[in-house]
Image: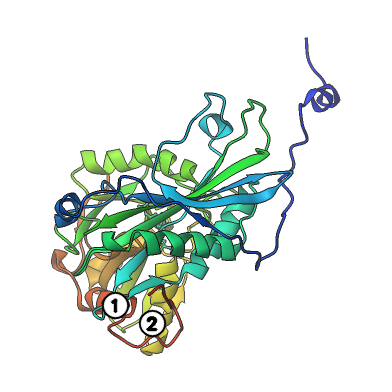
Amino acid sequence: MAVSIEQARRDRPTPDVAPAPTSGKGMSLKFEIQPAANPTSEKDRAARLADPGFGRVFTDHMAIVRYDQAKGWHGARVEARANFPLDPALAVLHYAQEIFEGLKAYKRDDGGVNLFRPDANAKRFQSSADRMAMAPLPEAVFIEAVEQLVRIDRAWIPGGEGSLYLRPFMIASEVFLGVKPSAEYIFAVIASPVGSYFKGGPAPVSIWVSENYTRAAIGGTGAVKCGGNYAASLRAQAEAIEHGCDQVVFLDAVERRYVEELGGMNVFFVFDDGSLLTPPLGTILPGITRDSIITLAKDAGMPVREEAYTIEQWRADAASGKLKEAFACGTAAVISPIGKVCSASGDFLISGGAAGPVAMGMRKKLVDIQYGRAPDPHDWIKKVF
Ligand code: PLP
Ligand code: COI
């Protein structure tokens, strides 16, 4: 029997509205600090820090804050990293109401520790929460959670070109199978010491142009950092690997021509007149590295255009020599030159497959600011120590 829309509305278990904000931008919480009873020994930590790779080694603690509609954000703690008890009906397990962020802590030569633009991550986390109908976390709580975790796990920050990758995330934690915004959330931050995202450091990467799969459409979730975007990118990334490439690059979902971004990175093009081009915001993630590069390039007098660029033009400009370099950028990967582009319609090289001077120069400029080796004219650095 057909059910009318009115009937379906009446039967709906609870209203499908986003949780009302319980706090403004500036609200903060006091974190209770409970150090781990059995932290990793110095010897074991040194062994794990010797070659951490990306995302497999974790520190001893996590920060955690809970939300429910009655109490708002509450129970802020830093405690031993541990499993979450997961009820099988937890909303996130069924409908993927989940968002995350990625930022790094860098050890300076004087022994201090820098965070890079954590306020920008906190703001993006709020817009992700808004798009996913989740409770907005006050920026001050986001930043305090990150700082408290860095403080307690300071010994895990690798020296040299390594860093401590911080992964704030939020999950829908209501035990309920109705399709509606969860009434409860868990926000947590975990930390992972990292070396290079790509094995072998910033060597040029090869990328596969995805013609079978798209990442995001207008009105979708491409501009926010929700886990579902990454789940949906995995098949395309697997196709890239099957074709011998390191990463996938997506085209727009309407005309299937305009270059958007990689699975986890934004993209830049460098031309023979010294200008840069990067795809415009809308369906791509507004990368903090992307924004920083635009600013640094403009500081250096390089014109930057945020304009649509087709895969056909990319191929033609690489062939004519008009395109000098292309590179990908993001927190995890920093800046990676793109050496080769592969697709069903053929492959082409960029700057002969070698790392170009603009990508490598920009990389140095950026990491020198992050590690406190260069002045910070835009106030991007937040010193934790
Ligand atoms: N695009 C996607 C899809 C990403 O996952 C990331 C990584 O966070 C980026 C771009 C780069 O963003 P950011 O520079 O803020 O790390
Ligand atoms: C990042 O660069 O922080 C990312 O989130 C990319 C990827 C690891 C998901």
Task: Give ligand 1's quarter of the image.
Answer: bottom left
Question: In this rendering, is residue 11 above or below 352?
Answer: above
Identify which residue is drawn at 44% across, 78% down: 380
| Foreground residue among 294 and 147 | 147
Q: Does any portion of residue 256 appear in the rendered image?
A: no
Q: Of residues 279 and 185, which is closer to you in this image?
A: 185
Q: Visible in this render: residue 79?
A: yes
Disc 2 marks which residue?
296
The quadrant of the rendering that contains the N terminus is top right
- Amino acid type, label 1: Met
- The crowding category of the residue bearing disc 2, from other C-alpha atoms within 10 Å (few below 14, some 14 to 19, many at least 20), is some
Vertical side of 2 occupied by 184: above or below = below
Are there few (<14), some (14-19), or many (20+) residues within 10 Å of tag 1? some
Residue 171 drawn at (x, y percent): 54, 42
Q: Quadrant of the C terminus?
A: bottom left
The residue singled out by tag 1 in the image is: 362
Residue appearing at x 70%, y 64% in the figure: 24
**Dot 1 and dot 2 residues touching (CB under 8 Å):** yes
Q: How is the image coloured?
A: rainbow
